[in-house]
Image: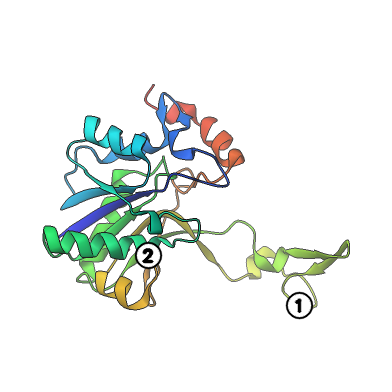
Amino acid sequence: MKILAVILARKNSKRLKNKHHLKLGNKSLINHTFDLLKKNLIFENIIVSTDDEKILNVVKKNYSQFIPFKRPDYLSRDSTNSFEVLIYVYNWYTKNYSNIDGIFLLQPTSPFRTIGTIRQMIEKFKKYKMKKSIVAVNKIKSHPEWMFQIKKNKMEKYIKKKSIRMSQYLQELYIVNGLGYLIVPKDLINQKTTIPENSLAYICKNHLETLDIDNKDDLEIAKSFKQYFKL
């Protein structure tokens, strides 16, 4: 079984400026993902796809076991979807290296992700003979039936029901947390998405692992867990 890991790290983040270089503990956010994978006993190869020269230089200098991959400008726009970059990387890799059974997308914004979780996702992928994509999810805390929208300063139920049911009667729902996507290449290319139809869920119950740093509040929450950093 051959799985290619791809770390996507576009330079110009809008919601949290320069987020990949922000300090979390004694190192930058992206280095938490790099250091987790630097011994690489799991993947066929690890590609870092970025348009950020600083990240490329860090990879070349300190992580020679990774493949630094300069992303073209047309795949570095705000409107670029992750699946577009993954297809580009996949085509390049299979042309220059070898065919693969799966692509493991790793976003640098999940600094508490563990090797154990990655291994469990891969084991599930293997169990289903590399024919089903695996997507990390976690159970939602706030149910849509309890949510409201505001129109002209008035509260309106988001889901139109006569009454709000008690929590024990609500259907369990899950949300993609960005921790990891293990994708069948054929589905990626044909469906053009990182969550293909009939994907299987990897349910992560560790809420710290599922923290996705996307804004300043997320970063402050992450910093509050400093006891988990190797300082």
SS under mark 2: helix
Q: Taking the image as drawn, is residue 1 in sight? A: no
Residue 116 visible in rendering: yes
From the viewer's side, name the closer residue of 44 and 225. Answer: 44
Query: Alpha-carbon distance for marks 1 and 2?
Result: 36 Å
Q: Which residue is mark 2?
A: 83
Residue at the location (47% across, 43% down)?
A: 208
Counting labels gives 2
Foreground pick, 6 / 61: 61
Q: Residue at (72%, 63%) from the top-left corner?
A: 147
Horizontal side of residue 192 vs 65, given as left or right: right
Of marks 1 and 2, which one's residue comes earlier in the chain? 2
Asked which quadrant contains residue 73, the reply is bottom left
Task: Please tell me the numbered disc located at residue 161.
Answer: 1
**Mark 2 Cα shell of 10 Å, populated few (<14), some (14-19), many (≥20):** some
Q: In the image, what residue type sits under mark 1?
A: Lys
Q: Is residue 73 above or below residue 169?
A: above
- Residue 68, image x and y in percent? 24, 44
* Quadrant housing the C terminus: top left
Mark 1 Cα shell of 10 Å, populated few (<14), some (14-19), many (≥20): few
Q: Which quadrant is home to the N terminus?
A: bottom left
> Nearest the camera: 155 or 153?
153
Give the residue type that dot 2 points to.
Phe
Q: Nearer the viewer, mark 1 or mark 2?
A: 2
**Could you say where residue 69 lies in the image, as x and y percent from the top left?**
26, 48
Question: Which mark, residue 147?
Answer: none
Q: Classify residue 191 as left or right of residue 130.
A: right
